[in-house]
Amino acid sequence: MSPLPLAFAMPPAPPTDFRRALYAGALFKLAPSEASLRLAHEVHEVLAEAFRDVGDPREAQFRLPAGEHLERLGRVRQVLGREARFLEGARAVLAAAGQEPGAYALDTLRLRGILDRGQEIAAAAPVYFAHRDTWYANPRAQLNWWLALHDAPEEETFTFFPEAFERPVPNSSSTFDYATWRAQAGWQNPRRAASAAYPTSLVPLDGFQERGFACRTGEVLVFSGAHLHRTRPHTSGRTRFSLDFRAVHLEDHHRGLGAPDVDNRSTGSTLEDYVHPATARAGGAA
């Protein structure tokens, strides 16, 4: 599998050039910073506490019943969403990359736990769907920040289809309405309704080149939410953990700037549930 088409150690300056490059399809893999390593460490501490009686969190899936394992991961995710220090950690990652955190609205941080042989679990099938985040009613100006919580070889991460960035792909995004989704499922809800929509490509992607990547602990991959991508199934013998958050530069959004929107038919907008800078200053992030 080919490496990422564009991967730089540091984003270009000024910040506007960084955003424009991402909106045009560039992918940046940023070197670990003090902020990204600190955030990774704090998430590790929460994971370690949740699985302290069973040892390594990456091997906990083999030592707990599936339901209990999922429930404990759910508690970790609640901590990440509830405690303001994690959102502040995400803003520190933005600042370390030369961005102005106060210019961005941020979504809740999401812990990803991709199980060994998770692709064999029927209920987990949507995890592996090829999709663009924009098919889930996300803004064109959305930038995804994906933080490696441990060293992850290419076989444990996910892949991109960069040739599809500006090319329409038949998909099921017309079934997705954000208000309906929020009522039926919501992000990372283990009790989602069976009828909840998960937009995906409706055609084989064999004609597109698929590109992967590896990451070291603390490295951050930044990419546009308009990129077509999918999680790789893996059989590494351990759970792959990562952390990601979504950021929208509000001025760009209001000016109609962002990545191409070539095939999105979803309705609604996730931006209403982002934490906006004024809300964060008022203490609403907690």
Image (spheres, grey):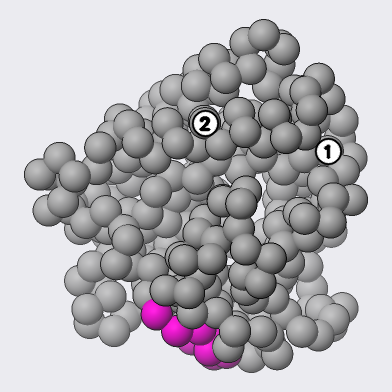
Image point 72% across, 80% down: which residue? 201
- Mark 2, secondary structure of its residue: helix
In the image, taking residue 93 as reference, residue 234 lies left or right, namely right
Q: Choose between 276 and 177: the one closer to the eye.
A: 177
Q: Choose between 38 and 186: the one closer to the eye.
A: 186
Work out whether 158 lies above or below 42. below
Nearer to us of marks 1 and 2 is: 2
**Label 2 sits on what residue type?**
Arg
Q: Which segment did they paint magenta?
A: 260-268
Can residue 138 be spotted in the picture? Answer: yes
Mark 1, residue position = 116
Quadrant of the rendered image containing residue 254:
bottom left
Q: Is residue 152 magenta?
A: no
- Quadrant where the image shows the N terminus: bottom right
Circle 1 crowding by C-alpha within 10 Å: few under 14, some 14–19, many from 20? many
- Quadrant where the image shows the C terminus: top left
Image point 72% across, 69% down: which residue? 130
Pointer 1 and pointer 2: residues touching (CB < 8 Å)?
Answer: no
**Label 1 sits on what residue type?**
Asp
In the image, taking residue 94 as reference, residue 61 lies left or right, namely right
Work out whether 257 lies above or below 229. below
Mark 2, residue position = 75
Main secondary-structure element of the magenta-colored stretch: loop
**Can you give x and y, in whole percent of width and height, for residue 72 in the image?**
61, 28
Which label number is shown at residue 134?
none
**Can you give x and y, in whole percent of width and height, for residue 116 in the image?**
83, 38
